[in-house]
Image: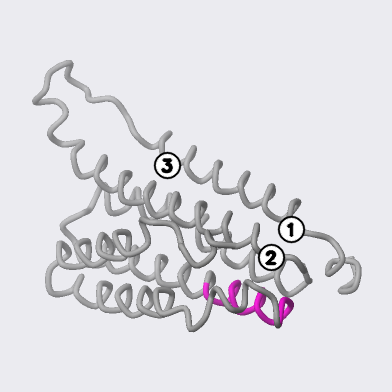
């Protein structure tokens, strides 16, 4: 599709494709959850880290899905650059099931915790790049005024980098950092909600 053809179309197809990919990501994560081998509450105890890693990742993907929806709904002009940066975001999000399974099985080790932070950081950078691509194609529109300086996006990257580094001090500090980013983003971006 040419750049001109992409710019005259809305973002409906882009949003539908992204929704499908994110739904598959969540489905893969939930399929990794296995029932306990024993039919007792004690049988659930070893599964707690696996379940908590799933909750963290489900929340992260859900936050991306929610904010991505608001971002694309506020976007009037599409472009090839927007579509490619969107694919870049989906690439990093598609690695979330892998790192989720890794921290679920090896939560006390620094490398899985750091790698989770790396993937999360790269997804945050990809989202930031998607926002920049959208702003470049939608210059002078309401979305440009709503996004502003995108402090939350920049702050997320910094916290993920710190969290990945903290994994080598104590993996639980890394996980606390990742939860902090989720808390920051849990409420959808109100700047876009107003549009």
Cα separation, mark 3 vs mark 1, equals 27 Å
Magenta segment: does it hold 92?
no
Give the number of the disc on residue 75. Answer: 2
Residue farthest left in this picture:
42
Give the residue pinned by disc 1: 11
User: At which x and y percent is residue 125?
Assistant: 49, 75
Q: Name the one closer to the observer, 45 or 64.
A: 64
Which residue has dot 3 on it?
A: 29
- Residue range (magenta): 128-139
Residue shown at 34% from the left, 66% from the top:
115
The picture quadrant where one finds residue 78 is bottom right
Q: Are marks 2 and 1 in contact (CB under 8 Å)?
A: yes
Crowding near the residue tagged with mark 3, few <14, some 14–19, many ≥20 C-alpha atoms within 10 Å: many
Q: Residue at x 20, y 36 (%)?
A: 47
**The residue tagged with tag 2: helix, strand or loop?**
loop
Residue 162 in picture, x, y percent from top left: 26, 78
Chief secondary structure of the magenta span? helix
Q: Quadrant of the C terminus?
A: bottom right
* Horizontal side, residue 143 vs residue 164: left or right: right
The numbered mark at residue 69 is none
Give the left or right position of residue 53, taking residue 99 as reference. left
Q: CA distance from mark 3 to mark 2?
A: 30 Å
- Please name which of the two marks, 2 or 1, marks the residue nearer to the observer: 2
Number of marks: 3
């Amino acid at each position: 599709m040419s750049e001109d053809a992409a710019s005259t179309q809305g973002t409906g197809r882009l949003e539908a494709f992204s929704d499908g990919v994110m739904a598959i990501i969540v489905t893969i994560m939930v399929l990794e959850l296995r029932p306990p081998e024993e039919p007792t509450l004690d049988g659930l105890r070893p599964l707690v880290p696996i379940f908590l890693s799933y909750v963290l990742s489900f929340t992260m993907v859900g936050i991306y899905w929610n904010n991505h929806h608001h971002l694309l709904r506020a976007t009037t002009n599409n472009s090839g650059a927007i579509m490619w940066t969107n694919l870049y975001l989906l690439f990093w999000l598609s690695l979330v099931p892998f790192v989720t399974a890794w921290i679920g099985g090896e939560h006390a080790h620094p490398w899985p915790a750091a790698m989770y932070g790396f993937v999360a950081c790269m997804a945050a950078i990809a989202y930031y790049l998607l926002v920049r691509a959208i702003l470049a194609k939608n210059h002078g529109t309401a979305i440009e005024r709503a996004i502003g300086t995108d402090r939350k996006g920049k702050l997320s990257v910094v916290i993920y980098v710190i969290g990945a580094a903290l994994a080598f001090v104590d993996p639980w500090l890394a996980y606390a950092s990742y939860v902090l980013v989720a808390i920051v983003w849990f409420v959808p971006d109100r700047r876009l909600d107003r549009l």
